[in-house]
Image (cartoon, rainbow, N blue to C red):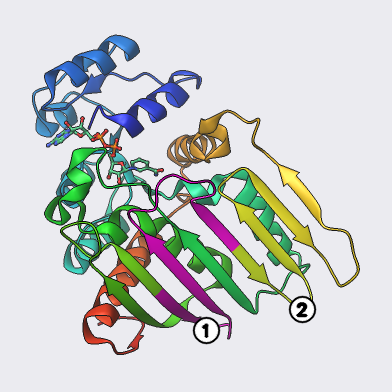
Amino acid sequence: MGAGFINNVHADVLMREDGVRITAVVDPDVERAATLAAKTGAAVMPSLEALLESGVDAVYIATPNALHAQAALAALAAGVHVFAEKPMATTLADARRVRQAASSARGVYQMGFNRRFAPIYRLLKELIQKGELTPHWAHLKMNRGELHSPPWVADAAVSGGFLYETTIHLLDMSRWLFGEVREVMCRAAQSCYNQLDDFAMLISFASGATATLCSSAHATWLFPFERVEVFGDHATAVTEEMERLTYCSGLGRAAVTHDQAQLPMPARWGYVEEDRLFLAAITGGGQPAVSAEDGYRAVELVEACYRAARTAEPVPLPLE
Ligand SMILES: NC(=O)c1ccc[n+]([C@@H]2O[C@H](COP(=O)([O-])OP(=O)(O)OC[C@H]3O[C@@H](n4cnc5c(N)ncnc54)[C@H](O)[C@@H]3O)[C@@H](O)[C@H]2O)c1
């Protein structure tokens, strides 16, 4: 569902996997639907309902954000496995509905937080899991060059807002790396677009760690537009997008850089691995690699940040 940029990436990955056939495409943009259908050998369907009735096992939902929740609910109700691009929903109430539906569904529901499977972020997670880097403090940045392309991202009614569209990736990343969030504080401004487009957040974790996260929607695509810096006990790891991780394990020690820049984009950004894990969860009857609970918690974090920006007060989590 959706024959735009990201479903073309998923289709390219899936076409290389054994046992997968892409059979149906739905998109109101007939040219895009026809192009993806021709590339994959699929039939163009007039609606999601028709696609679900055509006997598919799984659906990839990659429409503009505000449409994700209803589509996921329909697919789960039809007993179809769902891979949903982020965000799970653009309101907390809808996210709750999807989480509830996923918990009792016959099908697997997996969220598209691809960064968790990018080799650079996996290395960072490994350093933390092995105890080589205990995250006491962290500094994250998630910028975007513009809100021009695709055009719907400029419309907060369709995207949910900049935090839903872009920053949600690193909000999820912070929870994945440092654990559950206890409180967020946030300053935000409307600088260049018709929505809040500059954010400075202070995030406190149950572990005792603290992170700052700055996110601007109008920063140009100057490299690296995305960066995570983690500070341990006289040890630091720094990432540059999904290309490099540099790690220094102690005072007076040489820093080591892992460079993944040569990997093709779908592998470097984690799309190949997340798609494989989705297929494995479907065929093996296992758990999704990124769960509905993860999708819900990310929406909750976004909502907490917007609330903290609006009220200029710290917002404790979980939200009720
Ligand atoms: N995980 C990631 O790294 C990543 C990257 C890009 C996009 N995304 C997410 O994927 C989604 C799609 O983003 P994109 O960049 O591919 O956007 P896009 O605009 O390129 O594609 C979206 C497509 O959905 C179609 N569409 C609109 N209404 C529809 C409907 N009712 N039924 C079926 N199709 C419909 C549009 O015509 C368009 O072709 C967004 O939610 C975005 O946040 C995730």
For disc 1, the neighbor class at 10 Å (few under 14, some 14 to 19, many from 20) is few
Q: Kindly give the residue lying farthest to the bottom in the view shown.
A: 313
What is the quadrant of residue 138 in the picture? bottom right
| Start-end of magenta stretch | 201-228
In the image, 10: left or right of 44?
A: right
Dot 1: element = loop
Q: Can residue 208 be found in the magenta stretch?
A: yes
- The answer to whether residue 204 is seen in the rendering is yes
- Where is residue 63? Give x, y as percent: 22, 39
- Where is residue 281? Give x, y as percent: 47, 42
Q: In this view of the protein, which residue sits in the foreground, 114 or 101?
A: 114
- The answer to whether residue 72 is seen in the rendering is no
Q: Which of the marked residues, 1 or 2, is nearer the chain's N terminus? A: 1
Residue underneath mark 1: 206
Residue depicted at x 66% and y 46%:
244
For disc 2, the neighbor class at 10 Å (few under 14, some 14 to 19, many from 20) is some
Residue depicted at x 44% and y 67%:
214
Q: Which mark is residue 241?
A: none
State whether residue 206 is above or below residue 123: below
Residue underneath mark 2: 233
State whether residue 312 is above or below residue 122: below
In the image, 91: left or right of 182?
A: left
Dot 2: element = loop
Q: Kindly give the residue lying farthest to the right in the view shown.
A: 252
Amino acid beneath label 1: Ala
Residue depicted at x 57% and y 65%:
177
- CA–CA distance in space, label 1 to label 2: 18 Å
